[in-house]
Each structure stands twice: as C-alpha cells, then as structure tokens.
Image (cartoon, grey):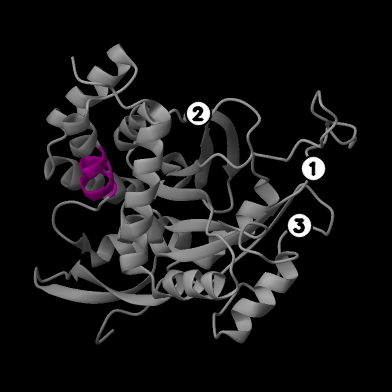
Amino acid sequence: MPALLPPRELRQRFVAEATAKFARNVPDFVRLQQLIAARGGRFVNDHGAIRTADPQLAALFVRAARVLGLHRDRDYLFPAKRLRSFDLQVPGDDAQAFKIFVSEVDLAAFPPPVAVLIRDDCATQAAAVDHTAFIAQIGKAEAAGGLAEADARAFIRHFCEVLMTRSGPPLKRATLDSVAAESGEAASALALGPDFNHVTVDVTAAGFGGIEAMAAAMQAAGLVLLPAIQGAPGSMLRQTATMAATMATPVIEADGRTGSASTEKQFVEIIERGPARDADGAVLWTDDGQPRTYRHFLAANAEQIFGAAATRSRPSPGG
C-alpha cells in the first residue's frame, strides 16, 4: 500500500501552490517578496482569504480544508459589508500555522432582486465545473487520514486551480453594478471568484522590527497602502494592506456582447501578532512560561482591511 501524505504535508503543498498562483496575478506581492529577500527576511504566509457568495461552494471548501488539517473555528459578522466570515485553523496553540479566512456574501442582507442576481450567477458558475473526482479524493482522505502521492497531486491541483477559480461565463455587468451599489466587497467577491483575495505576510519573520517599519519600507518601495494600521501598539493583532490594483474584468453586457469592467480584487496584507489575552485583558501564558501569541482575528481590524478590495458602482460605457 502506498504511503499516505498526512494533513501537514498536504497543507504545505497547498500553501506553496496557492501562493505561487497568487504571485502570478498580483505584482505587488512579487515586489514585497523581493523586498523581504533583499533584507534577508523570510516570507511566512500567515493566512489567505477568500470571499464567496455560494453556500455550497463554501461548504465544499470547508470540507476540503479539513483534508489539510484546517478546521472551522470562530465566526465574525460584518453587517455593514454584507458579509459573514469564519476562520479555518489548525487545532492547538501554534499561531504561526497557516490559516484561511472565509467570507460569505450574506444574501439575506441584499434586496431580493439583487439576491436573485447573485444566486443566478452562483448557479451559472456551479454548472460550469465538475468536482466529482475532487470529492472522491476528499472521501479517501477522510477515510484514511491522508492521500497517496497521485491523489495528493490531483487534489491540490483541483483545489487551487479549479475550486478556487471563477468558473463559467463572465459576470453580467448588471449583476456587478447592482451588487456594487450595495457592497463593494461583495462585488469584488463575484468578480474574482473564490480565489485568495489576499495573502498575509508575517512582519516578524520578514525581518522588520515592527509593522510601522515594514509599512514604511513598503511605501518607500512604491506600494500603496491603506491609510492606517489597524490595531493599537501592544494590542493582540495589528494589520494593514496594500490597495488592490484596479483591473479589467470581462463582463457580459446587456446586449450579450463581452465587455470590460474595472474591478478591485486582490491585495497583500501584513500582520503583526501580539500576546493573547483573556476576557479581562490579562496576558495568557503557556505552561513553560512563554506568552501565547494571538492566533485568531479581530472583527474591527478585518472590517477596515476589507476596504482594500472593494469594487464600487461605476457608470457603464456610454451611460
């Protein structure tokens, strides 16, 4: 019987392939990697994030992530953004373990006619892809605790290149505009599909003394960041991000022809994790006397980070 690759190995392969895919699409990420390498730092991907409007796709994503040893942990609500989120974590206290932050478009928060447009787009995407073999590989991993080499390669490839990709025909411009008028973040989710809309660089591993120093170096290198760092000095979590580049995205116009819309979809985040604290604000310590590093997320921070990729409503050509 062939040896099985366990969740840790599968997770490492997934992170490598998904990060390489992200680098192909996001020039700012490549520039940041070069900046880190020039300083002799290490690139550590703290987490990636996806947004999706399809509950069935989100459920399949969660099931596939369990094969990687990532399990659903905490929930986060963002009513102003019309998003509901949760994190996928490796159980335990390792704050450096890779994580995924999943945001679902809250269909109930949209006017019914707009929710219908979103559901129709999700159904069109779902009909354009076949996950049968992928689901079978998930079943094998669930039964055995890992995957053989050939199945592992196919599983990671499908996860990154098929599941985490917008499938089917382009988005309808009417749908994009209607959703953008309600939530720029949800509009970006539809435009990109369930790919990583950002990956997150660990500040300390990158060789910087703090997030202010890293943000300043990024700006000096020409990267455009959000106006402020989220999280006060000394807090459990501090974050900021580049602004997503405006990109041309294919759309179906009202007359059926393929046009192009300007959208904001992918950006790079940097993160500095501080000591975890209890409900009273006291630092949490490990049994051997080391401060525990905070490994979750803060909704107040994330709400501001969301704005790095928000596609707002724009006039249609000629309108």
Q: Left of 282 or right of it: where is 172? A: left
Residue nearer the viewer, 278 or 312: 278
Q: Marks 3 and 1, Cα distance to the nearest angstrom?
A: 13 Å
Residue 167 image point, x, y percent: 18, 51
**Between tags 1 and 2, which lies in front?**
1
Q: Marks 1 and 2, Cα distance to the nearest angstrom?
A: 22 Å
Q: Which residue: 26% across, 40% down?
A: 156
Q: Look at the numbered disc 3 and give the secondary structure of its residue.
A: loop
The main secondary structure of the magenta stretch is helix
Which residue range is magenta in the image?
156-164
- Compared with residue 150, is residue 259 higher up or lower down, i.e. above or below? below
Q: Quadrant of the N terminus?
A: top left
Q: Which residue is mark 2?
A: 72
Residue nearer the viewer, 211 or 167: 211
Q: Which residue is mark 1?
A: 275
Q: Which residue is mark 3?
A: 231
